[in-house]
């Protein structure tokens, strides 16, 4: 079976689904290929900055329908128990990927997007057109958006540089019931990693942490690791001991790479984590994914209305816009990661922030954007 589209999107996470909605609302024929079904849980921090709300509203996406938790405060703690607190400059909200991705999926379907639930096993570019192959069909398109996440078999097919480098990081995520302030997103440091804690819809607590694999593998299981490593931070210990896991077991992913990625490769326009991954400690990867979908979609629409006259111009404009909006954030994320995984520097950092409270909101601004303007 063969399907012809204006735009093919490989991957149906936040970036892919948002782009599908945006492009289909503007009368382009969109096909999206996603290997997994909806709804589904994903390893993710599940906090989103309010910067993306104007854009979502412009697409007819009303987040309030999902009953998100409103978040206005940030709290950080070191492994030794020192804390720093700040108001979030823009504020944000907590919403699970289980609910949000399915909501966007249904919106894309209502826009007549074609969604294929299969795995891409090959993608090629020839004679100014792409062909993507699954086990059962082929999709051809003038434009392809890569939205296949942090690490995918498609990265291997494209022979992307970062894919050949081993990463020391793995992530663990679970939903819990328990008592926690609704309006706080917290980041708790521990030896070899850091853990984000915040509420999502229906009073659920999302706990997601990034761990150094070298430390993690010294323990026989996740529970043993948490009790011997994460519990050294008294704040984290309190969170876990006063919460009950709602999953059968926590979700895990490994080989999370923070290596630099190219926003365009093999003429595929990369969006979301596929284009570049900000450290979770910066807490804003979901907003970046949605914003990148806007940037790519607007440029593709300009291409199809001849305001952008060539593929080369389209690719150069996207690279420029990606770097303009996200280059500094990703760079700051790498700097903060180095700081917050060093015990001595982390304690000095928190002491400095405690003495000068205005510093922390300014640091937060470096990893967050301004409200996205709508033309």
Image (cartoon, rainbow, N blue to C red):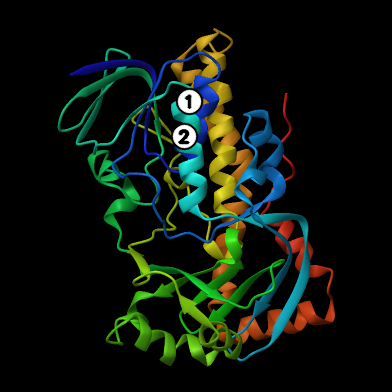
User: Under tag 2, what secondary structure?
Assistant: helix
Q: Is residue 200 visible?
A: no
Within 10 Å of disc 2 (Cα), the crowding (few <14, some 14-19, many 20+) is some
Q: Which mark is residue 67?
A: none
* Marks 1 and 2 close (CB-CB < 8 Å): yes
Seen at 43% across and 90% down, the residue is 227
**Residue 51: percent from left, percent from top:** 70, 45
Q: Is residue 215 above or below residue 32?
A: below
Q: Which residue is mark 2?
A: 106
Location of the C terminus by quadrant is top right
**Residue 168: percent from left, percent from top:** 36, 70
Seen at 58% across and 75% down, the residue is 340
Q: Is residue 246 visible?
A: yes
- Point out the residue furthest to the top here: 306
Q: Quadrant of residue 360?
A: bottom right
CA separation, marks 1 and 2?
6 Å
Q: Is residue 236 above or below residue 333?
A: below
User: Under tag 1, what secondary structure?
Assistant: helix
Within 10 Å of disc 1 (Cα), the crowding (few <14, some 14-19, many 20+) is few
Q: Which mark is residue 110?
A: 1
Q: Is residue 265 above or below residue 205?
A: above
Determine whether, in the image, residue 247 is placed left or right of residue 130.
Answer: right
Determine whether, in the image, residue 263 is placed left or right of residue 282.
Answer: left
């Amino acid at each position: 079976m063969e399907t012809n589209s204006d735009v093919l999107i490989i991957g149906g996470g936040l970036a892919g689904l948002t782009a599908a909605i945006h492009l289909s609302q503007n009368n382009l024929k969109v096909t999206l290929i996603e290997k997994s079904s909806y709804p589904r849980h994903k390893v993710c921090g599940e906090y989103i900055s309010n910067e993306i709300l104007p854009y979502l509203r412009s697409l007819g996406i009303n987040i309030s329908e999902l009953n998100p938790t409103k978040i206005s405060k940030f709290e950080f703690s070191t492994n030794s128990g020192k804390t720093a607190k700040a108001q979030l400059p823009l504020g944000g909200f907590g919403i699970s990927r289980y609910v949000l991705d399915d909501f966007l999926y249904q919106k894309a379907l209502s826009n007549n997007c074609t969604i294929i639930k299969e795995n891409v096993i090959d993608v090629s570019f020839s004679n100014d057109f792409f062909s993507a192959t699954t086990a059962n069909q082929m999709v051809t398109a003038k434009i392809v958006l890569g939205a296949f996440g942090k690490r995918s078999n498609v990265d291997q097919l494209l022979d992307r540089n970062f894919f050949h480098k081993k990463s020391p990081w793995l992530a663990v995520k679970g939903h819990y019931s328990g008592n926690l302030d609704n309006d706080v997103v917290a980041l708790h440091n521990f030896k070899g990693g850091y853990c984000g804690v915040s509420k999502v819809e229906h009073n659920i607590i999302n706990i997601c942490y990034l761990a150094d694999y070298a430390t993690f593998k010294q323990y026989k299981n996740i529970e043993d690791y948490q009790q011997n490593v994460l519990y050294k931070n008294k704040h984290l210990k309190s969170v876990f001991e006063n919460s009950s896991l709602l999953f059968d077991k926590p979700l895990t992913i490994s080989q999370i790479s923070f290596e630099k990625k190219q926003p365009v490769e093999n003429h595929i326009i990369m969006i979301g984590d596929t284009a570049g991954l900000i450290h979770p400690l910066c807490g804003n990867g979901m907003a970046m994914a949605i914003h990148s979908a806007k940037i790519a979609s607007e440029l593709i629409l300009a291409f199809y209305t001849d305001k952008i006259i060539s593929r080369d111009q389209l690719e150069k404009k996207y690279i420029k816009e990606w770097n303009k909006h996200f280059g500094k954030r990703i760079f700051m994320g790498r700097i903060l990661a180095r700081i917050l995984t060093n015990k001595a520097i982390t304690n000095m950092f928190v002491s400095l922030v405690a003495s000068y409270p205005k510093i922390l909101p300014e640091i937060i601004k470096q990893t967050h954007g301004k409200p996205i303007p709508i033309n």
